[in-house]
Image: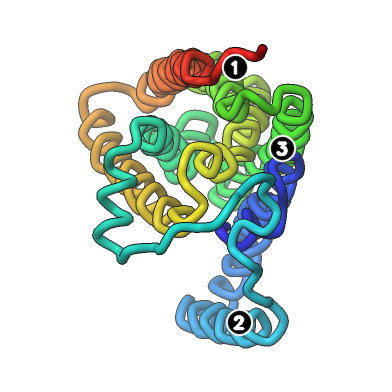
């Protein structure tokens, strides 16, 4: 992601990263389907070996064709870059960045919700609507992932368009992310509340689309608020902590499902999306006001 940030300027960065992110969704569908086929006919060990070997091949291809760009070469007025200063200095600088912490906490909440749906929606469809195992697995992932591809492309284009019109607003991408989270909350609630399988799948499409809108600016928004020299480290910190939020979801849903119905647990995730969406919106607006106050008045 840091390489993409160097290759693309602010007015194309969201779209470039959105295309990259869409590969996650497409890979989840194609890889999951293919792994299921291999596992069904040949067992799970060959599937692991096959994907492991494919990863090694891809690594050599990237090593051969990807070239390291000049750091910050696409950023206007980047100026001379500072000395990196080492890992610990970088981590301390990131830890003292309120905007980076806000984005990280929101990412943890969004991953918490995403992991619940990715892991438990097929089980929910199997138990509540008596779908077959294969159909519940496909329906529980494909509708969400395909809609996310559309959402991530739309969100990237929307953010880049707004940045071009509002270049003085470095938190514009955060506002687009908050829009995705808030608009996705009603679909999360509906996914567990309705008794119709058609409505559940429609809710999954709506949630998937707005999840994509949020995901489209995950790293581009972070790059707007951290120094160029800290891009790689900031992605590492945010990504690792964000997936800890996803891991916590599995334990939480296990405890909750012992006391409440699965449908109630799924609908309750809407409150998480709404809270982190509003927190991101308010944080972005506050950062914008602070930046406006620091800017010298035009003569």
Circles 1 and 3 in contact, beta carbons < 8 Å: no
Which is nearer the eye, 227 or 251?
Answer: 227
Q: Is residue 226 above or below residue 67?
A: above
Which type of secondary structure does the marked residue at label 2 adopt? Answer: helix
Asked if one can make out residue 137 in the rendered structure from this viewpoint, the answer is yes
Q: Is residue 149 above or below residue 53?
A: above
Q: Residue furthest front?
A: 299
- Point out which mark residue 156 bears: 3
Circles 1 and 2 in contact, beta carbons < 8 Å: no
Give neighbour class at mark 3: few <14, some 14-19, many 20+ (Cα, 10 Å).
many
What residue sits right under mark 1 in the picture?
Answer: 183
Which is nearer the eye, 116 or 260?
Answer: 116
In the picture provided, is 195 more to the left or to the right than 279? right
Q: Earlier in the sequence, mark 2 or mark 3?
A: 2
Q: Position of residue 190 (x, y in %)?
A: 54, 16
Q: Earlier in the sequence, mark 1 or mark 3?
A: 3
In the picture provided, is 190 more to the left or to the right than 201? left
Given this view, does label 2 or label 3 mark the residue nearer the observer?
A: 3
Q: CA distance from mark 2 to mark 3?
A: 29 Å
Given this view, does label 1 or label 3 mark the residue nearer the observer?
A: 3
Q: Position of residue 55 (x, y in %)?
A: 56, 79
Q: Earlier in the sequence, mark 1 or mark 2?
A: 2
Q: CA distance from mark 1 to mark 2?
A: 38 Å
In the picture provided, is 18 more to the left or to the right than 214? right
Which type of secondary structure does the marked residue at label 1 adopt? Answer: helix
What residue sits right under mark 2 in the picture?
Answer: 54
């Amino acid at each position: 992601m840091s390489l993409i940030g160097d290759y693309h300027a602010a007015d194309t960065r969201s779209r470039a990263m959105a295309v990259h992110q869409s590969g996650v969704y497409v890979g989840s569908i194609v890889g999951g389907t293919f792994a299921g086929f291999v596992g069904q006919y040949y067992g799970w060990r060959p599937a692991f070996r096959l994907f492991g070997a494919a990863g090694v091949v891809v690594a050599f291809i990237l090593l051969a064709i990807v070239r390291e760009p000049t750091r910050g070469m696409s950023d206007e007025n980047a100026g001379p870059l500072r000395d990196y200063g080492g890992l610990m200095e970088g981590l301390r600088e990131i830890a003292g960045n309120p905007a980076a912490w806000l984005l990280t906490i929101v990412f943890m909440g969004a991953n918490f919700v995403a992991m619940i749906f990715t892991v438990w929606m097929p089980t929910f469809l199997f138990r509540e609507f008596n779908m077959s195992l294969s159909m519940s697995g496909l329906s529980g992932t494909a509708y969400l992932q395909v809609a996310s591809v559309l959402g991530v492309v739309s969100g990237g284009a929307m953010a880049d368009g707004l940045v071009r019109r509002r270049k003085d607003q470095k938190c514009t991408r955060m506002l687009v992310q908050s829009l995705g989270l808030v608009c996705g909350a009603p679909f999360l609630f509906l996914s567990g509340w309705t008794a119709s399988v058609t409505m559940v799948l429609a809710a999954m499409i709506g949630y998937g689309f707005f999840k994509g809108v949020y995901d489209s600016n995950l790293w581009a928004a972070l790059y707007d608020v951290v120094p160029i020299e800290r891009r790689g480290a900031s992605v590492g910190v945010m990504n690792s902590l964000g997936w800890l939020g996803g891991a916590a979801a599995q334990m939480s849903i296990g405890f909750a499902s012992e006391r409440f119905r699965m449908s109630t647990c799924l609908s309750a995730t809407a409150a998480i999306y709404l809270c982190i969406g509003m927190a991101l919106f308010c944080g972005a607006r506050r950062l914008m006001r602070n930046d406006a106050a620091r800017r010298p008045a035009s003569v």
